[in-house]
Amino acid sequence: MKVKVLYFASVREKLGKDAEDLDLPADVATVAGLRSHLRARGGAWAEAMAEGKLLRAALNQDMAQPAAAIKAGDEVAFFPPVTGG
Amino acid sequence: MKISVQSGDFDVGLEIRNISKNNSIGAVASFVGLVRDVAMTLEHYPGMTERAIEKIVDEAKSRWQVLDCAVIHRYGALQPNDQIVMVAVASGHRGDAFAACEFIMDYLKTQAPFWKKEQTAEGTRWVEAKSADDKAAERWK
């Protein structure tokens, strides 16, 4: 399943990457699943995606809960809690 | 209705005049946020940002009478005292205008994908989200 993954702010800086196209294994089916999948890369990924880390996610440009299901062609983004205004 | 995410500055007076043209408007409430103390760079999520603000405005419209409104948020490099954000709501009466304006601002703080990075004498640092902002948004639930 192909998806686009985006990273913003401190997450983007830590990973040294702002976007990538991924072909996910069949068992990665939710936002939380994708986060674990990325965490398993180790190094900066393990840190940026760590379980205790306060992260927000968006699915197709809407704020998303960890349990949200992802499907082929989706755009998923990971970022810290927002600080605009 | 105007929603704009832009790098350039805005003219609050002009924006207020532009949303005050309907004869049934009796009140316009507005808020302007400024950069305090230190220079900063604002990053955002192009595409999602506009969409998130539209959703917040739609929610405000479902709760109060909003005859017109303008929400403008800047991104990029900003200096102390620069304008960052403005929200202006036009309504028949002040109660709805005040409430909708405050609601949009509170939700924008927690739902719109912007991130501030401050430039201090010691270097740059990402601003941490405040739990007070979450509380401010929660009281509207």
Image (cartoon, rainbow, N blue to C red):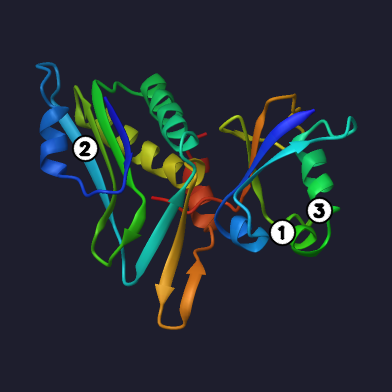
**Mark 2 — residue?**
B29
Point 67% across, 28% down: residue: A74
**Mark 3 — residue?**
A39
Left or right side of A17 for B101: left
Q: Have a look at marks 1 and 3 and say if they share a chain.
A: yes
Q: Which of B77 and B111 is in front in this view?
A: B77
Left or right side of A15 for B78: left
User: Does A64 sit above or below residue B58?
Assistant: below
Q: What residue type is labelled 3?
A: Arg
Q: Locate residue B33, reporting x and y percent.
A: 29, 53
Which circle, 2 or 3, is nearer the viewer? 3
Point 75% across, 54% down: residue: A49
Q: Mark 2, chain letter? A: B
Give the Cα separation between the discs numbered 2 and 1.
Answer: 41 Å
Q: Locate residue B39, reporting x and y percent.
A: 34, 68
Q: What residue type is labelled 1?
A: Ala
Q: Where does the N terminus of chain B fall, quadrant-wise? A: top left
Q: Have a look at marks 2 and 3 and say if they share a chain.
A: no
**Mark 1 — residue?**
A48
Q: Which amino acid does label 2 sit on?
A: Ala
